Amino acid sequence: DIIVLVVAAEDGVMQQTKEVVRLAEEAGVTVIVAINKIDKPEADIERTKRGLIQLGLSLEGHGGDIQVVPISALKGTNLTELAETISAQATMMGLKADFKGFVEGIVIESKLDKYRGKLSTTIVTRGTLRKGAVLVSGTAYAKVRGLFDHAGKPMECATPGTPVEILGWRDLPLSGEQVLEVENEKKASSVIRFRNGQQMEQKADNDREAILLKEMEHLEKYRAERDARRRMGFYTSRRKGPRQKEIPDDDGFPCVNIILKGDVHGSVEAILNVLDTYDDSEKCRLNIVHYGVGNVSEGDVELSKLFNAIIYAFSVDSSVAMKSKALVRDFNVIYHMIDDLKKEISSKLPPLEVEEIVGEANVLQIFQVTEGRKEVTVLGCRCTKGMLKKKLNYKIKRHDEIIYTGGLDSMRHLKNEVDSVKNDTECGLKPKDLSCDVKPGDVIYCYSMGEKAQSTTWD
């Protein structure tokens, strides 16, 4: 019904903030902003507000109606005001629910607890949930064996608006799925069979579409190859595709393969949503080999070795991977994990070739000099910046146009051949294969070629 968007005052808008705002807009859910950690010395409430406004949130006091409450969860500052703001917003929206009838709810998160088993955190939206109730969510069902509050204390019942941990699931439900109460386990099994059948039909439809698309791709490729052979004057090849020894195991294109394991469905879903924004595939592919909820397993380790994949463990135990010396990285903050992934992607990119200007010179005069029987052009110059080195590369620029690029045959100071010329020194330069008309006032640049590490543009 209402999203409380918590933003740290010292960090401001982060990637997960953008994701929550996007989801809130798509779902049309009312937002209340809680700016947390205002007790920190580096807290900047106004900067955080400006960042939220740039995301499109119309904040109260800035021409909008989205309420903002600065808080400190650590010290309890303004938490009562936040609770009152939520209550007032709910009253304004006229939020009501029926305490009778079959239970309905929404799964917020689900997880595998090593002591209690499969648990889901669910918000009850209708009815009163008690032990013994039979629930269905997606293709998972539960006979409720226990109800727990946010502190892990047992509850007798859960009414609308109450978050509750439900124990008794046969399979973990997915975050965001609706929870419905049914009469008995027989009815639950019937509902799940029906839904599984629907999923199989949908998968079959999707597979048919994928097969048709693939057939069209193969047909277009075949026609293109056939037309090319006809244009070259032969059409006798019987070989289908490349020879076996010519099929590479790897095309050599930069790629990063990852395996993602998280503590709860909500965390995994949030990270996958961020990964869906990856937009730098032209430089480096990002392949999600596998993802799931729970601790890193031996199966994950085997996949990691098979696909040379990094295991990203989000708030889960990764000791199995560490013992096997698999490449695993542990995080409990999403944007720290994404920053690490960006560094990994950037490390796969080839370095960029860049020019480094070593020196500059102005052309003062043009000389025609006879060498043997051949007349050559020599440029009388003055070094105005840095140093000119004979062995490096040169380019000549007139206004904004490069009129020459190449090396030098000769560099002279007075009448002596030299290897370099310092700043504020006159010299004579004879470029190799000079075919353009150089004029006094043109600028000569001496430069070397170097390499610069690339960074991914994914943001």
Image (tube, grey):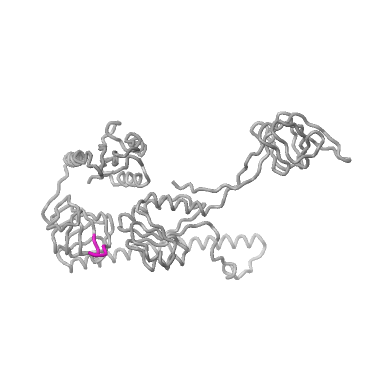
- Residue drawn 31% across and 42% down? 7
Instruction: State whether residue 362 is above or below residue 342.
Output: above
Pick the residue in front: 230 or 294.
294
> Which residue sits furthest left?
100
In the displayed structure image, the side of residue 187 where residue 247 appears, left or right: right
Q: In this orientation, which residue lies closer to the viewer: 70 or 234?
A: 70
Residue at x-position 32% and y-position 44%: 21
Q: Is 118 within the magenta?
A: yes
Query: Percent position (x, y) of residue 405?
Result: 70, 41
Residue 133 x %, y %: 15, 62
Q: Indicate whether residue 408 is drawn in magenta.
A: no
Residue shown at the point (33%, 60%) measured from the top left:
316
96 left or right, relative to 405: left
For residue 389, side relative to residue 150 (left or right): right
Residue segment shown in magenta: 113-119
Q: Residue at x 19, y 57 (%)?
A: 152
Residue 318 is left or right of residue 410, and the answer is: left
Above or below: residue 381 compared with residue 5? above
Q: x, y percentage for residue 290?
A: 39, 62
Depth check, front residue: 431 or 194: 431
Q: Nearer the viewer, residue 53 or 214?
A: 53
| Image position, residue 119 (x, y; %) | 23, 61
Instruction: Tell me if residue 434 can be seen.
Output: no
